[in-house]
Image (cartoon, rainbow, N blue to C red):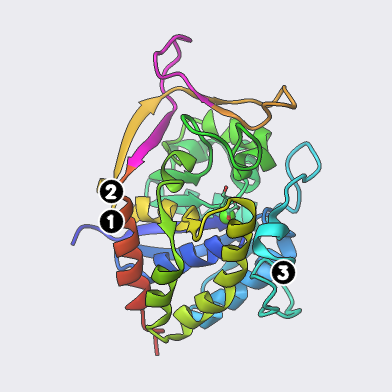
């Protein structure tokens, strides 16, 4: 097997974030070195409590959890994550209780870890890009110090989900996304163009739950709320697989068709706020800054997920 990819996951758990973190922990191709937490699906302290809870269930309570931004860079949070993930971010299961959360040090954590391992770390961003934007603004040299920044976000050739044109993570902090897309580091965008092609159905979730492990038991508890939200709001009998698909891009990039292209983010128009515009015909004559995922082997993602997460055994 090739080299183990060292990753830090920036996340707003979040039901699909939880599913994504479990895939990362269950995959020998990755070594998760910490989670940084950002306001997104729910408030940052609740996201942090959820992160501590899911790491404990997965047998990785040892991993660092660094809390970050509790609001977007320049505008009030305007998302509706709780309607999709529950007020507690874990499907109204109340699993995380009121445990204390660590200090706010996500930006320092990102800067220190990346600076200590030039070219070694991949950052997988599963929420709004506030923490990454702050980190690369405080320490611009990060842009030349990461192996890759994989972003779950955007929609370049398909409709949005937060608005008709914008995907939720980008729409929740468009100014942060613009900074991240133009920082100069290698960005891979895993957007709705591919995640809307990957759907987990109730039958699939039953196969996952049949493993009856502490991790699949957790997913069986938190996914019904998410499923209900999708059935009610999207009208499908299943849910789109957003964050786990982004983690899969770090594990098996061969499952994706990508293209290097110039991408910008709309921040100055309320109707189009957070829209990610890809200049496929190079009409703006600007150098490509993002590797955009345009197609995906959806069955390959689902097979990978089931194999890894159903097969995962909590370390003794
Ligand atoms: O648009 C989907 C993204 O928004 C996912 O990361 C989900 O967790 C929410 O944060
Ligand atoms: Ca997320």
Residue farthest right in this picture:
76
Q: Check residue 89 for magenta coloring.
A: no
Residue tagged by mark 3? 88
Position of residue 40 measured from the top left corner of the image (x, y, whole percent): 67, 53
Viewer-side label of 3, 1: 1
Q: What range is drawn magenta here?
A: 277-295
Q: CA distance from mark 2 to mark 3?
A: 33 Å
**Does 233 appear above or below 215?**
above
Residue 269, quarter of picture:
top right
Residue at (54%, 52%) from the top-left corner? 126
Can residue 307 be spotted in the picture? Answer: yes
Residue tagged by mark 2? 255
- Figure quadrant of the C terminus: bottom left
Q: Earlier in the sequence, mark 3 or mark 1?
A: 3
Residue at (74%, 66%) from the top-left corner? 87
Q: CA distance from mark 3 to mark 1?
A: 31 Å
- Density class for disc 3 (Cα within 10 Å; few <14, some 14-19, many ≥20) is many
């Amino acid at each position: 097997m090739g080299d183990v990819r060292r990753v830090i996951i920036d996340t707003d758990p979040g039901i699909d974030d939880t599913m994504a973190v479990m895939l990362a922990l269950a995959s020998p191709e990755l070594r998760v070195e910490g989670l940084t937490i950002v306001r997104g699906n729910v408030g940052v302290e609740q996201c942090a409590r959820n992160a501590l809870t899911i790491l404990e269930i997965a047998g990785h309570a040892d991993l660092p959890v660094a809390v970050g931004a509790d609001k977007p860079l320049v505008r009030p949070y305007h998302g509706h994550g709780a309607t999709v993930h529950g007020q507690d971010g874990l499907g109204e299961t109340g699993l995380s209780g009121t445990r204390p959360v660590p200090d706010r040090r996500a930006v320092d954590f990102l800067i220190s870890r990346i600076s200590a391992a030039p070219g070694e770390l991949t950052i997988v961003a599963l929420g709004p890009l506030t923490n990454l934007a702050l980190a690369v603004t405080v320490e611009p040299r990060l842009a030349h110090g990461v192996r890759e920044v994989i972003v779950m976000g955007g929609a370049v050739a398909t409709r949005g989900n937060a608005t008709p044109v914008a995907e939720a993570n980008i729409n929740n902090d468009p100014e942060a996304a613009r900074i991240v897309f133009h920082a100069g580091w290698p960005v891979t965008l895993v957007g709705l163009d591919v995640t809307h092609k990957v759907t987990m159905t109730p039958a699939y979730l039953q196969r996952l739950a049949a493993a009856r492990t502490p991790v699949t038991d957790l997913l069986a508890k938190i996914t019904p709320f998410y499923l209900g939200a999708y059935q009610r709001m999207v009208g499908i009998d299943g849910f789109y697989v957003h964050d786990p698909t982004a983690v899969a891009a770090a594990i098996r990039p061969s499952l994706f068709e990508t293209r290097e292209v110039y991408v910008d983010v709309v921040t100055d128009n309320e109707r189009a706020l957070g829209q990610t515009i890809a200049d496929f015909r190079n009409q703006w004559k600007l150098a490509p800054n993002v590797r955009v995922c345009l197609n995906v082997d959806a069955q390959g993602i689902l097979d990978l997920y089931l194999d890894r997460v159903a097969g995962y055994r909590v370390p003794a």
